Amino acid sequence: MHILIAHHTRIPVTKYGGTERIMWWLGKELQRLGHQVSFLVNSQSNCPFAEIVPIKKRIPLNDQVPEGVDLVHFFFQPREEVEKPYLVTNQGNVPDDEKHLPLDQNTVFVSKNHAKRHGAERFVYNGLDTSDCGPPDLNRERSYFHFLAKASWKLKNLQGAIEIAERAEKRLEILGGSRINHKTGLKYFDKRDLKFHGMVGGERKNRILNGSKGLIFPVLWNEPFGIAMIESLYFGCPVFGTTFGSLPEIINEDVGYLSNDVSDLVSAIKTSHYDKKMCHDYVHSQFTAENMTMNYLKLYEKVLSGERLNYQAPSAGNTFNEKCEMIDSTND
């Protein structure tokens, strides 16, 4: 089968870029399974295992699909009638200023909760290409916890992670931000037990995760999936987070602790006793690029047979700015 993966972005990415990495891992696994893969992406992209077709803004999408393509896999919502069989992966929540725009009936979401909040049925969990991570050192002595997200985005709640780590008397390594945050009013984090690594990727990122005792992930929005969680689990790091969005679906009691109470999370981190190998094995059994790709292939077959993936077109609903807050029972 010849599959065209389409997005307006540039690939590959070396640091931040969840959607781009999922596209890359999916294409790589499809190619490994014997399928032909092309990417319709930004002209500055490059790829050793697939053809790059530069996407152009002012030309109809149908005119940009190469001859011989069997199916188009969009990672954005196409705003025109698509002639080829296709599906659309929605990796995020629809922001308020886009709620008036329709979602395609062939839209696939990235968790059951994510689909349900959009009035849809179809979802495929994101999967990790473990070859990008290298082997975890599950016997290594670990001395700190980490935060992994785009720290400038308030909904990822770096401030909350810092407070939780401080109250638990744990050192925090921060991946995805800097000590001075210009986007939140030139905020300066002056605590000495914080180490900021910026937008880090590749071997350096893997090395930091390999030395961590756990991910502190107190998000304040309905997380669609949370690639940071499965990356951390792969390295044997349990997840300590809130209960919003996909988190209760992804994190069970064997691999982490979830609560919207700050004091509960502090206590859980202080007494952390999770099995690193169990965390690692959980990712291998549930959240690999191979699992993800096989699930997409099942949906490709449905689309190619003329089936619509959802009974009706999904709707944006109240998916982005729904109020998500934490409490602190010590203040009650």
Image (cartoon, rainbow, N blue to C red):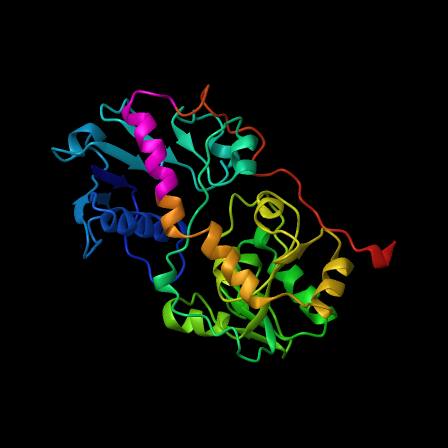
Our reading of the magenta stretch's main secondary structure is: helix
Q: Position of residue 81 (x, y in %)?
A: 28, 22
Q: Quadrant of residue 298?
A: top left
Read off the magenta span.
294-308
**Along the horizontal axis of the image, is 322 left or right of 179?**
right
For the image, the number of numbered tags is 0
Q: Where is residue 145 in the image (x, y as percent from the top left)?
A: 60, 70
Whether residue 182 appears in this view of the structure is no
Residue 296 is one of the magenta-drawn residues? yes
Identified at 53% across, 54% down, the residue is 153
Identified at 32% across, 58% down, the residue is 13
Q: In which quarter of the image is residue 171?
A: bottom right
Q: Compared with residue 300, is residue 208 higher up or lower down, i.e. above or below?
A: below
Residue 198 is one of the magenta-drawn residues? no
Query: Nearest the camera: 53 or 285?
Result: 285
Query: Nearest the camera: 16 or 37?
Result: 37
